[in-house]
C-alpha cells in the first residue's frame, strides 16, 4: 500500500503529527501503536514493499513477548515460533528461563521477518500511511515542526525529463518535502535521520568478517539453538522453519574484509571448528560477511526528532537482544508521543524517553559485549575469568536472577522521582484481575490501567478518560492502588489509595 502525496509546507501546523523513517520491527511497532491510538502517522521506507528473509534476529525474549501480548500479538507469534526454556551461552554456562516470573518463561525462536509480517499487518489495519521506495535525503526543524526532504520512485523517474535534468545540472535533487510535528528515525545503523540531526555514533567494530549463511542440513542438530565457542571459532545455528538454517560464525584466523568472497567450504570449516561438525551443510541460498559493531548515539532526541532501535544503538548479536531492545524502545516512545500529540500531557514527557531508554541501551551494549568477549576468551587469565564467572552464576541465585532479568528484559526498571512509591518505574507482571481478566489484556489499545482494591470503586473512570484509561480491581485482597502505563511499567502507586491521591495521579499521568 503506497500513500498519496499530501500538501506540504515549511511553516504553520504540520499536516502529519508523526513521520517514522524505516519499516523494520521497531518502526512498524511504533507506527502501529500511534495509529491504533488515533494518531495519524506516515511510515517512510526506501525499500520496495516486500518481505525479506535475510533475518539477523531470531529470538524474542520474555519482556518483548509481554509487550506484544499487550497488543494482542504474542499468542499468534508463539504459534509460529518454537519455544526454548534453556539457553546455552559458553563454557557450559546454561541460562534457565523456565523459572522467569512471566507468562512467557522461555525464549521464542522466530525469524525477524515473521515478526515484521505480523507488525506490518497490524500497522496497515490501524491506518498507517506507507510510503515505500521513498528515501529521506535530509531534514530540518523549527519551533513548529520538522520538514523532511524525500526522493521517491516518482521523483526519480522525473529526473529523466529535460526539466529535471536542468535542475540536476544546477546541483539540486528532484524530490518532495513532508512536514510533521515529530519525526522518529528507526532507519538502522546507517541512519540518515541520525546524520541529519548531527549526532555522532561513537564506538568501534568488535568482530570483523562474521560469516552469514542460509543452508540446509543433512543432520538435524540436537538442540533448537546451537551455539558454542572453541578456541578461535564461534558459531550460532538457528532454524528458519522452512527447512533452512541460519549460520552465524566467526574464525579469528580468517580476518578479512567484508567484501572478500565467501564460499560454502569456509562456512563448513568455521562450523566444524566451533561446533565439532558441519551437520552435512548443503544448498546455501545466501551467504555474506559483515562486521559487528558496538555503538550508541549520545542522545536519542534532538528537538522534535527521535532515534530508536539500531539507529540509536548497535551491539554484538550475543544474547539475541538487538531486535528486542528496539521493540522496547518503540513501546516506550509510542505512548508518550500519543499523550503529547493528543494534548493529554506536556511536551516535557518526551524527555523521559532519553532518561529511561539510553541507560538500557548502554547496559545491553555492555552485557552483549561481555558475553562475546568471554565466549571468545583465549588468554589463560580470560579463560580463568570465564570459568570463575560460570561457577559464580551457577552458585549465586540472586546474581543469576539479575543476569537473566537483564538478558530477557524483565529486570530493567526506570528512574523514579524522589519520594515515589517503591513500585514506581518497575515492570508490572501480568497480574490476575477480578472477573477472570489479566493486566496485559487491559493494556490493549494503548491505555493506562488503574488497579484498585475492589472496595475503591471506579474512581477516575469518567468520560474524560475512558478512551485512554481502564479501571480494574485486584483478583486478590491486595490493598495497593497501582497506575500502570501503556508500556506495562508502574507510573504511580499508593498503599493507602486515598481518593484525592488517586485523582491527582490520574490528572498528572493520564491527563
Image (cartoon, helix red, strand yellow):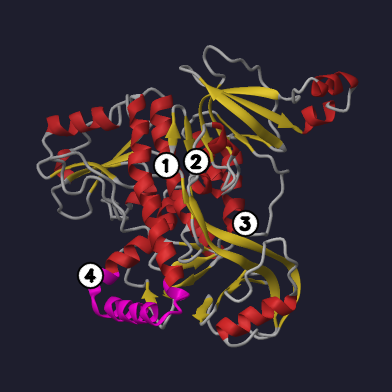
Instruction: Name the residue that disc number 3 marks.
Output: 113
Name of the residue lying farthest toward the right: 162
N-term-proximal mark, 1 vs 2: 2
Residue 507, by quadrant, is top left
Name of the residue lying farthest toward the top: 12
Q: Separation of disc 1 and disc 3 at Cα? A: 29 Å
N-term-proximal mark, 1 vs 4: 1
Is mark 1 in CB contact (under 8 Å) with mark 2?
A: yes
Q: Nearer the viewer, residue 287 or 409?
A: 287
**In this rendering, the label closer to the viewer, 1 or 3:** 1
Q: The magenta stretch spans which residues? A: 374-400
Q: Which mark identifies residue 398?
A: 4
Q: Separation of disc 1 and disc 4 at Cα? A: 32 Å
**Residue 451 falls inside the magenta stretch:** no
Q: Separation of disc 4 and disc 2 at Cα? A: 37 Å
Residue 79: x and y, percent? 54, 64
N-term-proximal mark, 1 vs 3: 3
Q: Is residue 414 left or right of residue 137?
A: left
Q: Nearer the viewer, residue 486 or 155?
A: 155
Please tell me whether mark 2 sits on a helix, a strand or a loop. Answer: loop
Residue 242: x and y, percent? 68, 69
Residue 156, by quadrant, is top right
Instruction: Name the residue that disc number 2 marks.
Output: 200
Q: Vertical placement of 219 versus 290: above or below?
A: below
Please tell me whether mark 1 sits on a helix, a strand or a loop. Answer: loop
Please tell me whether mark 3 sits on a helix, a strand or a loop. Answer: helix
Q: Which mark identifies residue 298?
A: 1
Amino acid at each position: 500500500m503506497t500513500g498519496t502525496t499530501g500538501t506540504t509546507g515549511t511553516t504553520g501546523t504540520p499536516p502529519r503529527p508523526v513521520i517514522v523513517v524505516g519499516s523494520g520491527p521497531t518502526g512498524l511497532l511504533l507506527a502501529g501503536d500511534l495509529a491504533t491510538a488515533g494518531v495519524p502517522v506516515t511510515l517512510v521506507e526506501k525499500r520496495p514493499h516486500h518481505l525479506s528473509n535475510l533475518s539477523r534476529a531470531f529470538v524474542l525474549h520474555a519482556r518483548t513477548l509481554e509487550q506484544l501480548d499487550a497488543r494482542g500479538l504474542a499468542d499468534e507469534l508463539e504459534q509460529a515460533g518454537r519455544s526454548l526454556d534453556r539457553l546455552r551461552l559458553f563454557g557450559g554456562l546454561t541460562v534457565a528461563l523456565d523459572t522467569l516470573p512471566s507468562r512467557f518463561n522461555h525464549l521464542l525462536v522466530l525469524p525477524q521477518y515473521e515478526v515484521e509480517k505480523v507488525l506490518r499487518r497490524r500497522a496497515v489495519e490501524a491506518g498507517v500511511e506507507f510510503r515505500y521506495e521513498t528515501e529521506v535525503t535530509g531534514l530540518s526543524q523549527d519551533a513548529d515542526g520538522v520538514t523532511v526532504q524525500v526522493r521517491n520512485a516518482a521523483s526519480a523517474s522525473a529526473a529523466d525529463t529535460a526539466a529535471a535534468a536542468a535542475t540536476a545540472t544546477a546541483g539540486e535533487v528532484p524530490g518532495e518535502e513532508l512536514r510533521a510535528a515529530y519525526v522518529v528515525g528507526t532507519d538502522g545503523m546507517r541512519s540518515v535521520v541520525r546524520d541529519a540531526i548531527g549526532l555522532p555514533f561513537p564506538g568501534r567494530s568488535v568482530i570483523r568478517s562474521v560469516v552469514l549463511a542460509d543452508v540446509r542440513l543433512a543432520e538435524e542438530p540436537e538442540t533448537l539453538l546451537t551455539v558454542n565457542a572453541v578456541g578461535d571459532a564461534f558459531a550460532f545455528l538457528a532454524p528458519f522453519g522452512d527447512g533452512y538454517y541460519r549460520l552465524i560464525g566467526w574464525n579469528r584466523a580468517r580476518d578479512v574484509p567484508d567484501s572478500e568472497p565467501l564460499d560454502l567450504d569456509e562456512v563448513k570449516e568455521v562450523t566444524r571448528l566451533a561446533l565439532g561438525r558441519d551437520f552435512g551443510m548443503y544448498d546455501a541460498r545466501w551467504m555474506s560477511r559483515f562486521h559487528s559493531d558496538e555503538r550508541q548515539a549520545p542522545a536519542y532526541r534532538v528537538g522534535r526528532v527521535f532515534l530508536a532501535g539500531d539507529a540509536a544503538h548497535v551491539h554484538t548479536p550475543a544474547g539475541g537482544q538487538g531486535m528486542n531492545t528496539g521493540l522496547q524502545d518503540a513501546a516506550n516512545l509510542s505512548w508518550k508521543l500519543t499523550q503529547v500529540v493528543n494534548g493529554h500531557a506536556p511536551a516535557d514527557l518526551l524527555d523521559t524517553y532519553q532518561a529511561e531508554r539510553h541507560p538500557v541501551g548502554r547496559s545491553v551494549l555492555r552485557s552483549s559485549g561481555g558475553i562475546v568477549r568471554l565466549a571468545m576468551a583465549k588468554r589463560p587469565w580470560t579463560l580463568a575469568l570465564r570459568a570463575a564467572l560460570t561457577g559464580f552464576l551457577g552458585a549465586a541465585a540472586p546474581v543469576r536472577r539479575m543476569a537473566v532479568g537483564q538478558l530477557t528484559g524483565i529486570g530493567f526498571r526506570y528512574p523514579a522521582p524522589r519520594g515515589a512509591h517503591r513500585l514506581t518505574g518497575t515492570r508490572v507482571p501480568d497480574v490476575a484481575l477480578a472477573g477472570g481478566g489479566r493486566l496485559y489484556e487491559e493494556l490493549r489499545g494503548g491505555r493506562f490501567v488503574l488497579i484498585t482494591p475492589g472496595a475503591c470503586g471506579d474512581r477516575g473512570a469518567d468520560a474524560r478518560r475512558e478512551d485512554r484509561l481502564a479501571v480494574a480491581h485486584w483478583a486478590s485482597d491486595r490493598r495497593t492502588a497501582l497506575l500502570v502505563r501503556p508500556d506495562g511499567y508502574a507510573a504511580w502507586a499508593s498503599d493507602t489509595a486515598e481518593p484525592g491521591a488517586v485523582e491527582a495521579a490520574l490528572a498528572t499521568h493520564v491527563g
